[in-house]
Image (cartoon, rainbow, N blue to C red):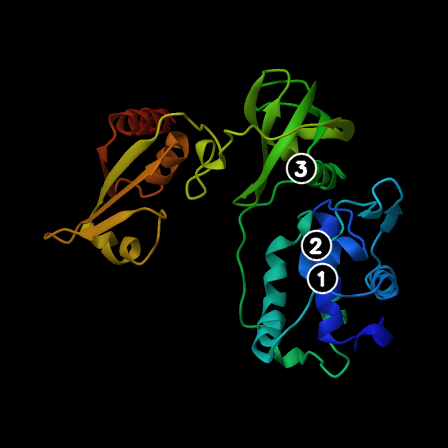
Amino acid sequence: MANKKHESPHILAYIMEIDKAIRNGEFPNASSMNKKMGWTISRSTFLRYMDILKGTYKAPVEFDFKRNGYFYTDKTYFMPQVMLAEGELLTLSTILPLLDQYKNTPLEGAYRGLMQKLLEMLPDSISVDSSLINNEVHFISDPITRLEEGVFENVLRATKLHRTLTLEYKSATSADYETREFDPYHIICQKGSWYLLGYSHSSNKIRTYAMPRIRNCKITEKSFSLPKDFKLENHIDPEMGVWTSSAQTFTVEIEFESQLKTFVSERIWHKDQILRENADGSVYLSFKTNQLGHTVAWVLSFAGEAKILNPPELKKEVAKAARRILKG
């Protein structure tokens, strides 16, 4: 690959546009790209660019004689495009310690492989000084759930390709696994745990599955399309959680005691929060969420130093949880 690194940026610009057209399913050829981009390249020049795409960038590209253009046999392929300035290189090197927080997760190996590829694609004249890596930074991660081997990879691939999964799933209250068909819409990581949001064929509804409870996960030949009215924010709240979603959105109002003033004020608890200090030093916080259950656990974490003003439903659920705690 080293002998190919020094293709001019002008040639790379052509190749990047061709790659984009292939990924968009346009089946490009020299004539169609000239018409689309206003180029004047010859067929032989176009074929030379295709040879670079195949040879240098290992693109799984083939010619479709019926469509008279090129396509990728692997729809998940992306052409590597790395252009780093000096400051970006420093940022890249300081990101390396962040990978420790992904230990024992399905992404650890993928991220480390990706970082290695990025470094390999840098020009030969650049090297990464190990002294740039900040060893004084340490991350304390949330407890990590375990996934059956192959589950994450199949889920990720099926989500990207819009393919139905067959899997065995055990809900939190079930004793046994059940075989189900599932259309994966979105993957979510919440505090070290992985979740899959999508359409459950058995319940005929959009559901959230905990990925550690999935086994024997396989990709089928069935394809699906996301509903036109699907909106991720209707099913999760990125600031609060992924479970107990409701069609109803609650306006949460909390008053924190004055001793928590600094702790509460220095944080962003929700993207649309309203935060203000009262005259007595207490702090008012308000935000909207559809995750009432997660909000209950969050309020309880303040050990009585957070007073619920609204909604009444939140007061009721926190009171129920507190009574269960006192029963021991």
Q: Earlier in the sequence, mark 1 or mark 3?
A: 1
Q: Earlier in the sequence, mark 2 or mark 3?
A: 2
* Residue 100: percent from left, percent from top: 62, 59
Q: Residue 108 versus residue 198: which sits nearer the camera? A: 198
| Residue 20 - label | 2
Residue located beneath label 1 in the image = 16
- Quadrant in the picture for the N terminus: bottom right
Q: Residue 137 versus residue 86: which sits nearer the camera? A: 86
- Neighbours of disc 3 within 10 Å: few (<14), some (14-19), many (20+): many
Residue located beneath label 3 in the image = 159
- 174 w.r.t. 309: above or below: above
Q: Which amino acid type is shown beneath numbered disc 3?
A: Thr
- 181 w.r.t. 127: above or below: above
Q: Nearer the viewer, mark 1 or mark 3?
A: 1
Q: Which amino acid type is shown beneath numbered disc 1?
A: Met
Q: Which amino acid type is shown beneath numbered disc 2?
A: Lys
Q: Residue 105 versus residue 287: which sits nearer the camera? A: 287
The residue shown at (75%, 53%) is: 32
- Quadrant in the picture for the C terminus: top left
- Side of 315 where 238 appears, left or right: right
